[in-house]
């Protein structure tokens, strides 16, 4: 560039010049503009080369968040799958494992919001709060970090889009008379993910005779979402018909509350599976040049565990495994895939009948409605649940509560550590034994 500067500073053109030199004087600014453009082009190409080949950041980051999935339940599901002639994809695809401590000496609370905030924001919060610091300030999260770095973002769940596990990533608060309705408003007002698929449609529309648990403030978030450019879908066929390359903003609400268990899916064919929603989410988000962050939450598994519905829980593990396999196949090798199982409910895996080993006599769960009631009120409550059809008395039915060591209206979460499995670029940094709050600091550089 030095010769260009000297060429520009020369005063030779002040003297009478031949016509060819005068022509050169006229094109001199164009030469400088061309050189500046080439310099900018090479800088841009160098930046792309560094980001894609030197920094080795994954194009996609997919975080599977699975409350209720503990190793004993996963092992039982794997054994059931092997009896059918196949193995779980989860047990074959991941090579990096970690143990996550969910409690601390100064904070032993196992509330959903507390555990979810430790994972999403890297800090434990007070009981009853979600993603709020000690002074009421909003904590940073992996979701907002990904947005600041230009990544596309998405949520997928077979539960409610406003449940605490997802709200910890985007919600500004968890207070007020209608926290779920407020969280639904924040999802669209402030978070604005590129894609959100799941249940909880009742929190997005006003309360009516048909929508008893709807919004009390009169806002119709579905109409507002359409005005903001979202494509709103309510059926699996509508989701499948969306063109992936031009669907930048998608809101899918497929049920008023959580979706249906996979064992009951035949009765509602218009509701998509977790695997289908995961596939469509990857197909739409991967067109973003800066990559994407997709958070997939398996919510129905925890609901089955709370009720001691062992068979339903095993089916939901299979549903999760199908979604993980789809994500592995569609996202490719440049994707960081992370699976986190937290907040187990004390499933006791006993040896199969043909194995000559001691068997647990008390039951399959530490606590839950499958236990023997010790008080009259507990026995009365259990009888009412069976009369309503919530619980079945037949051991072959999906909704039969399997035996528990002690009775409880819902199975209580245990303080056992959570676990993590990962594969893909950057996964080698996630292995080991550490606190759940460290996951935020380990994943954030990968975004």
Image (cartoon, grey):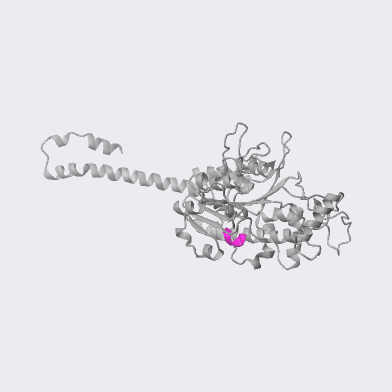
Pick whichever, 270 or 114, lies toward us: 270
In the displayed structure, 172 sits above or below 251; it is above
Q: Which residues are magenta?
A: 272-278
Going by the image, does 333 lie left or right of 111? left
- Give the total number of marks visible in the rendering: 0
The outermost residue toward the top is 135
Q: Quadrant of residue 35?
A: top left
Q: Residue at the spot x=57%, y=42% of the render?
A: 141
The outermost residue toward the front is 209
Q: Residue at the spot x=56%, y=60% of the render?
A: 279
The main secondary structure of the magenta stretch is helix
Pick whichever, 343 or 338, lies toward us: 343
Going by the image, does 365 lie left or right of 43? right
Q: Quadrant of the N terminus?
A: top left
Does the segment drawn in magenta span residue 58?
Answer: no
Residue 130: percent from left, percent from top: 63, 41
> Can residue 447 be seen by looking at this rendering?
no
Pick whichever, 378 or 93, lies toward us: 378
Going by the image, does 288 lie left or right of 98? left
Residue 26: percent from left, percent from top: 18, 43
Residue 65: percent from left, percent from top: 64, 50
Residue 157: percent from left, percent from top: 61, 54
Pick whichever, 31 or 90, lies toward us: 90
Q: Residue at the spot x=58%, y=47% of the render?
A: 181
> Can residue 48 be seen by looking at this rendering?
yes
């Amino acid at each position: 560039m030095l010769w260009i500067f000297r060429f520009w500073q020369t005063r030779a053109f002040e003297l009478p010049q031949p016509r060819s030199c005068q022509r050169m004087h006229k094109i001199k600014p164009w030469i400088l503009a061309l050189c500046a453009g080439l310099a900018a082009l090479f800088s841009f190409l160098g930046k792309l080369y560094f980001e894609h080949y030197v920094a080795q950041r994954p194009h996609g980051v997919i975080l599977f968040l699975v409350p209720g999935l503990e190793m004993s339940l996963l092992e039982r599901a794997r054994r059931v799958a092997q009896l059918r002639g196949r193995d779980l994809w989860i047990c074959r695809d991941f090579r990096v494992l970690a143990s996550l401590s969910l409690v601390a000496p100064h904070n032993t609370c196992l509330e959903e919001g507390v555990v979810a905030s430790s994972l999403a924001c890297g800090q434990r919060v007070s009981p009853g709060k979600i993603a709020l610091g000690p002074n009421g300030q909003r904590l940073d999260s992996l979701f907002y970090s990904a947005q600041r770095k230009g990544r596309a973002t998405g949520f997928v769940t077979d539960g409610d889009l406003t449940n605490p596990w997802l709200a910890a990533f985007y919600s500004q608060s968890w207070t007020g008379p209608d926290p779920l309705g407020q969280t639904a408003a924040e999802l669209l007002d402030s978070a604005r993910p590129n894609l959100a698929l799941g249940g909880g449609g009742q929190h997005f529309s006003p309360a009516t005779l048909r929508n008893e648990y709807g919004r009390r403030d009169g806002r119709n978030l579905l109409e507002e979402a359409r005005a903001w450019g979202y494509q709103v879908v309510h059926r699996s066929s509508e989701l499948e018909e969306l063109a992936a390359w031009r669907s930048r903003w998608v809101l899918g609400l497929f049920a008023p509350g959580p979706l249906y268990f996979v064992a009951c899916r035949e009765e509602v064919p218009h509701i998509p599976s977790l695997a289908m929603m995961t596939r469509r989410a990857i197909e739409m988000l991967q067109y973003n040049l800066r990559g994407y962050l997709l958070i997939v939450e398996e919510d129905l598994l925890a609901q089955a565990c709370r009720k001691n519905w062992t068979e339903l829980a095993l089916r939901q593990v299979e549903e999760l495994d199908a979604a993980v396999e789809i994500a592995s196949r569609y996202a490719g090798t440049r994707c960081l895939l992370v699976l986190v199982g937290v907040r187990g409910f004390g499933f006791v895996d006993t040896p199969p009948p043909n194995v000559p080993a001691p068997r647990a006599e008390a039951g399959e769960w530490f606590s839950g409605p499958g236990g023997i009631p010790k008080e009259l009120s507990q026995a009365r409550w259990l009888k009412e649940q069976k009369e309503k059809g919530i619980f079945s008395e037949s051991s072959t039915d999906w909704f039969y509560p399997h035996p528990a060591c002690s009775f409880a209206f819902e199975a209580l979460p245990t303080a056992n550590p959570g676990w993590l499995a990962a594969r893909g670029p950057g996964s080698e940094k996630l292995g080991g034994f550490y606190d759940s709050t460290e996951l935020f600091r380990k994943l954030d550089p990968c975004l």
